[in-house]
Image (tube, rainbow, N blue to C red):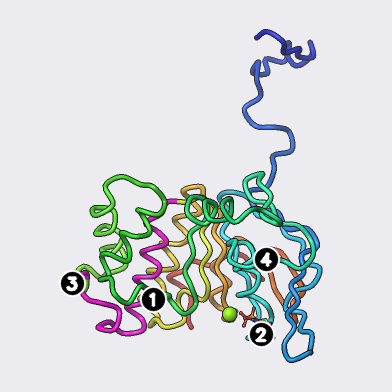
Amino acid sequence: MPGLALPEAAVRAGEPALAEAPANPQPLIALADVGRRYRLDGLEVAALSGVSLQVNAGEFVVVLGPSGSGKTTLLNLIGGLDAATSGHISVAGQAITGASRGTLAAYRRRTTSFVFQTFNLFPGLTALENVEFGAEAAGRQGTAEIARDRLAEVGLTDRMNHFPHQLSGGEQQRVASARALATNNPVLLADEPTGELDFATGVTILELLRAQAVAGRAVIVVTHNREIARAADRVVELSSGRIVSDGAPAGGRADVAKLHW
Ligand code: ADP
Ligand code: MG
């Protein structure tokens, strides 16, 4: 290994010549002292203040907080859909804060997948085409098959050719999850993804999201529902735009199927 000097002790201990993982691996997502202020009619609203957060690949994190606590703002900032007014965000070692429009566009297509709180399906595309769009944007091959598979997972095989206005709110929300799942991107961000769903369907979606974390993605799910938060490895609680706690759910992680909401 020319040019690489290893301490002798490491060689003797049988360490690999090139360490696979650095001693202090960088978190996939890192926010440092992030703030987002809005000015509306001369009035300043601090939607987020002093938010520092790190999320690793493979983590299933729930962001919990009441309405207006800054959850959507936080997810939009991590997703490169909005810009922080202070602090710094980096994802996969790349600075998101201050990045060019082109860099952010590529970041949204190739690094993140987003389930919007209000679905944001394309009204002129069928369910299948909406999901296929996710796979196409992420540059995947075999997008039609991927889209059919993701729709089957969320139980919508028989609604594939429906347009959004021909679907119920819950069905549209499942299409939105399927579209995000079709990207295979390393960061999955879901804003209240079970808000419109009955319990059984909500369980299916949460289990699909959890499986993404098991597969190595960083998954951040926003909810105002404390019971749903019990399904997470880690709960980050927001109140008035600030993180007030960050740790394992009280009583430890619960099986998704054993939750009640
Ligand atoms: P949550 O998703 O937790 O309900 P949001 O992140 O949507 O909360 O909003 C956090 C706070 O920021 C709220 O008080 C909201 O009214 C305010 N806010 C959000 N977006 C805007 C905006 N574009 N302009 C002004 N205030 C906003
Ligand atoms: Mg919200």
Residue at mark 4 to residue at mark 2: CA–CA distance: 18 Å
Q: Is residue 149 above or below residue 64?
A: above
Residue at image point 73% right, 80% down: 38
- Mark 2, ligand 1, within 8 Å: the answer is yes
Judged left or right of residue 96, residue 125 is left
Circle 1 is placed at which residue position? 173
Q: Mark 4 or mark 3, which is nearer the start of the sequence?
A: 4
Type of secondary structure dominating the magenta stretch: helix
The amino acid beneath tag 1 is Gln
Q: Which mark is residue 158?
A: 3
The picture quadrant where one finds residue 156 is bottom left
- Please state which of the two labelled residues, at mark 1 or mark 4, is closer to the viewer: 4
Q: Mark 2 or mark 3, which is nearer the start of the sequence?
A: 2
Residue range in magenta is 160-184
Residue at image point 34% right, 70% down: 175
Q: Is residue 93 above or below residue 68?
A: above
